[in-house]
Amino acid sequence: MNITQNIRIKSNRLLLRPFTESDIESVFKGLSHPDIIKYYGVSFDSLEATKEQMTWFADLEKEGTGMWFAVCSLDNKTFYGAGGLNDLNKEHKKAEIGFWLLTDFWGKGIMMEAMPLICNYGFEKLGLHRIEGFVESDNTNCKNAMAKLDFHYEGTMKDCEIKNGKFISLDIYSKLK
């Protein structure tokens, strides 16, 4: 059984729910947009290719290595983006958090409301002790959001990955239960 199969997390204005096949166009819209994928690890150039991401969301659950949620309006009529936990390590009680939003919803406080819901789910339901965030050093908006969400800056891994043929550095953030 999938971890999030029946899980719905709600706040005053948000619904976090499992992905459905009908979300593929919204996921493609987000993960093909140059401003969104600038700091995201994957991008897609077709709906067909986006099926890879949808499979990844499902495989996280099947393998027990995490879960991602579709972030929607409370009435489930508007898809805002996605957020979740991956690289779940049960032995060390930690996971990595990630998120992205469609550009129409930037600056509206959606992720500031969704991220604590995801963290609380990780801490309370999954028994995590640590949630990590790896943020490209140039991604000022995300770094500011991590600070507002009480994630603590731990340091920078300099030139630790290659993206688009260039070395990038990642800032490490964490939140402990």
Image (spheres, rainbow, N blue to C red):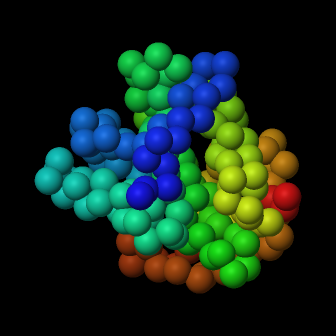
Compared with 49, 12 (above or below) is: above
Task: Place residue 28 in its image quadrant.
Answer: top left
At x 50% / y 69%, what residue is drawn? 64
Task: Place residue 160 in its image quadrant.
Answer: bottom right
Residue 2 image offset from top left, x and y in percent: 43, 56
At x 84% / y 61%, what residue is drawn? 176
Along the viewing direction, whichever of 137 and 146 lies nearer the viewer: 146
Residue that lies at the very extreme toward the front in this rendered image: 1
Along the viewing direction, whichever of 12 and 64 lies nearer the viewer: 64
Task: Place residue 24 in its image quadrant.
Answer: top left
Compared with 10, 56 (above or below) is: below
At x 53% / y 20%, what residue is drawn? 74
Residue 139 image offset from top left, x and y in percent: 62, 54
Taking the image as shown, residue 117 lies to the left or right of residue 30, namely right
Compared with 162, 11 (above or below) is: above
At x 56% / y 71%, what residue is drawn? 87
Is residue 140 at all visible to an observer of this figure? Answer: no
Taking the image as shown, residue 151 lies to the left or right of residue 109, namely right
Taking the image as shown, residue 88 lies to the left or right of residue 176, namely left
How many dots with numbers?
0
Taking the image as shown, residue 99 lies to the left or right of residue 175, namely left
Residue 44 image offset from top left, x and y in percent: 26, 55
**Quadrant location of the C terminus in the rendered image:** bottom right
Residue 128 image offset from top left, x and y in percent: 74, 64
**Quadrant location of the N terminus in the rendered image:** bottom left
Is residue 51 at all visible to an observer of this figure? Answer: yes
